[in-house]
Amino acid sequence: MYRTVVITGASSGAGRAIAYEFALQKDNLVLASRNIDELEEVKAECESMGGTAICVYTDVTSYGDVINLASAAADFGGNIDIWINNAGVLAAGSFEDTPVEVLDQVIRTNLMGYIHGAHAVLPYFKSQGRGVLINNISIGGFLPVPYGVGYSASKFGLRGFSASLRAELVNFSGIHICDAYPAFLDTPGIQHAANYTGKSIRPAPPVYDPARLAIAIAELAAHPKSEVMVGSASILLRYAYAVFPALTSRITAKVISTYLNRAEPIEKIDGNIFNTVKYGNAVHGGWGVPGKPKAHRKYIAAGLLMLSAAGLMLLRKK
């Protein structure tokens, strides 16, 4: 029996990769995004892989749109088996240089969009007695990002929201709330980002193939658990901040500020914060080495050495 899977933000990047992964399993896909033209392309590709799909225009900041998405999914598949909250946006820039309406929109999209999704689908899950809600949160849920205050606020908020909801539903054994925390991904997300730094930006290495996240999410759907870290860098960064929060924050800020001082100047842009864009709608952003996780080991080794050295220095000062 094929499952009905809802994916928000399915028109590019991680969402598109996730759609392809479930299409290979011949599931019924409900593809949601503000970019309906790109969704139609994703639909055609998913159907060529063996899946069945519909496209539903959805702005996740609008609860009405999300309610409509849930209704369309139930009509399409009879039930809603899996709901994947994935749609998100990014704004880079110092806090005072980032317009407050942009910060508001980042939080409305990244945090309230996921809350809207959960609120819309839970009545269906409870009626069915089962369902899997998967939140694609990112390592940003554990690691604060300087020059991305709105993004960090939304991701830290998502972690608390999901943990609280999971505890509230502890007596509903058939309903699962799962969180995915990928490291930096090779997606077009940075290309789509609002950028008020005045400098060209790119994701920090190592970056991972979004297909790795898609496979991990498919595994979560089949075998639900509370959380999964995707990529060894995500594990390193999570525990680095847990053990050395001040040091990790200082290093992160220093790395970013040094990069911005040297980066190529560009005009400030709003990206896709308020409207869709016509560029960068593939799965990959062209930032990394997709499918070669061993290439990242040098970064992980360097990170471990750096943290070990920092830890020893702190111990000596005591």
Image (cartoon, grey):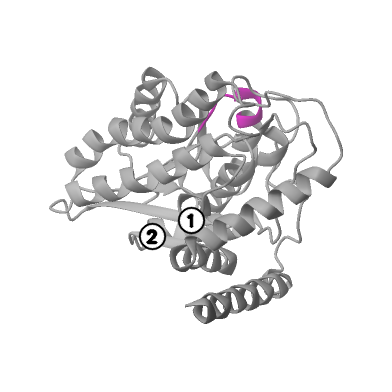
Residue 139 in the magenta stretch? The answer is no
Q: Residue at x 52, y 77 (%)?
A: 317
Q: Position of residue 235 (x, y in %)?
A: 51, 67
Looking at this view, name the residue that lies furthest to the right. 264
Give the quarter of the image for residue 84.
top left
Task: Give the numbered dot on residue 227.
Answer: 2
Give the quarter of the image for residue 146.
top right
Instruction: Look at label 1 and name its amino acid.
Output: Tyr
Q: Does residue 218 show up?
A: yes
* Residue 235 vertical placement versus 55 (above, below): below
As helix, strand or loop, the secondary structure at mark 2 comes to strand
Observer-nearest residue: 313 or 47?
313
Q: Which residue is mark 1?
A: 181
Q: Does residue 203 show up?
A: no
User: Horizontally, is 77 left or right of 180 in the view?
Assistant: left
Observer-nearest residue: 203 or 20?
203
Q: Position of residue 125 (x, y in %)?
A: 24, 41
User: Horizontally, is 109 left or right of 313 in the view?
Assistant: left
User: Horizontally, is 196 left or right of 139 in the view?
Assistant: right
Instruction: Look at label 2 and name its amino acid.
Output: Glu
Q: Residue at x 53, y 75 (%)?
A: 314
Looking at this view, name the residue that lies furthest to the left. 171
**Mark 2–mark 1 contact, CB under 8 Å?**
yes
Observer-nearest residue: 165 or 14?
165
Q: Residue at x 33, y 32 (%)?
A: 74
For label 2, the crowd category at 10 Å Cα-Cα, with few meaning under 14, some 14 to 19 and many 20 or more, is: some
